[in-house]
Image (cartoon, helix red, strand yellow):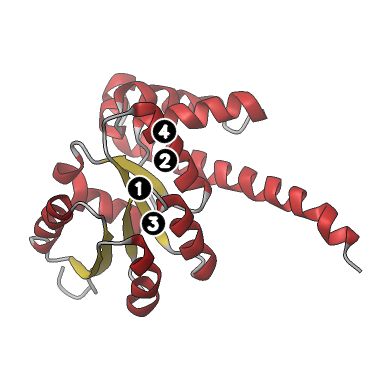
Amino acid sequence: MAGLDPIRVVLCDSHTLFRRGLLVVLEREPDIEVVGEAVYKDDLVDLVVSTRPDVTVVGLGGTGPHVIGVLTRSLPGLRIMALSVADDEDTIGDEALAAVGNGAVGHLVKEGAVSVFAHTVRLVHAGDPPVSGPLSARLLELEQQTGEIWTGHERRVFQVIAQTGSVERTATNLGVDSRVVRGLVRNGMARFHRRLAQERAAAAAPASLAAP
């Protein structure tokens, strides 16, 4: 886009064909620039530190959630989008929850991701987290276990996303503009991260008080 710096993106995924497909999609976009690629997650930290991207895309599996935690602790404010292979929804939900718990701003399932990928990168850069169906389902389970996190409208949006798998289909289902759904998701994810920060601070407090 004329007069604006492009959105700088780093891609990390061990599936070469999928990663190259994402690269081809992004290379067509004048407002997005891929500044680095990593095959192995062990290489990602150094790459992100050296390139300082606006958005980092991390394929999950293996050490993905752990590496996301290392990155967000090293570079607070880093926007990380996690991706999962769509073959086992239980596994996807677990790793998606671990990823956002370690600091990823959102999560997509790889199946169908290519067609919406550039748009999603722009949303992440603008502060709108993508939330997949499996992640929504796990977040709802977590709220049931730990107590209320969201407002009623936010909870309803996550319930419908868990069923439909996307913001756009959720907006259609609820008969509202997709911007309304994105706003509720954005607020809901912010509440989730605040709750997580409070729980971690509370867990760390006894150790701090016991220190000499």
Q: Amino acid at mark 2?
A: Ala
Q: Amino acid at mark 1?
A: Leu
Secondary structure at numbered mark 2: helix
Q: Quadrant of the N terminus?
A: bottom left
Label 3 to label 4: alpha-carbon separation = 17 Å
Q: Residues within 10 Å of mark 2 (few under 14, many from 20)?
A: many
Q: Earlier in the sequence, mark 2 or mark 3?
A: 3
For the residues bearing labels 2 and 3, Cβ distance under 8 angstroms: no
For the residues bearing labels 1 and 2, Cβ distance under 8 angstroms: yes
Q: Quadrant of the C terminus?
A: bottom right
Residue occupying the point 27% across, 39% down: 85
Residue occupying the point 46% across, 64% down: 71
Q: Earlier in the sequence, mark 1 or mark 4?
A: 1
Disc 1 target residue: 60
Residue 41, how many percent across, how many down? 35, 61
Q: Earlier in the sequence, mark 1 or mark 3?
A: 1
Label 2 to label 3: alpha-carbon separation = 12 Å
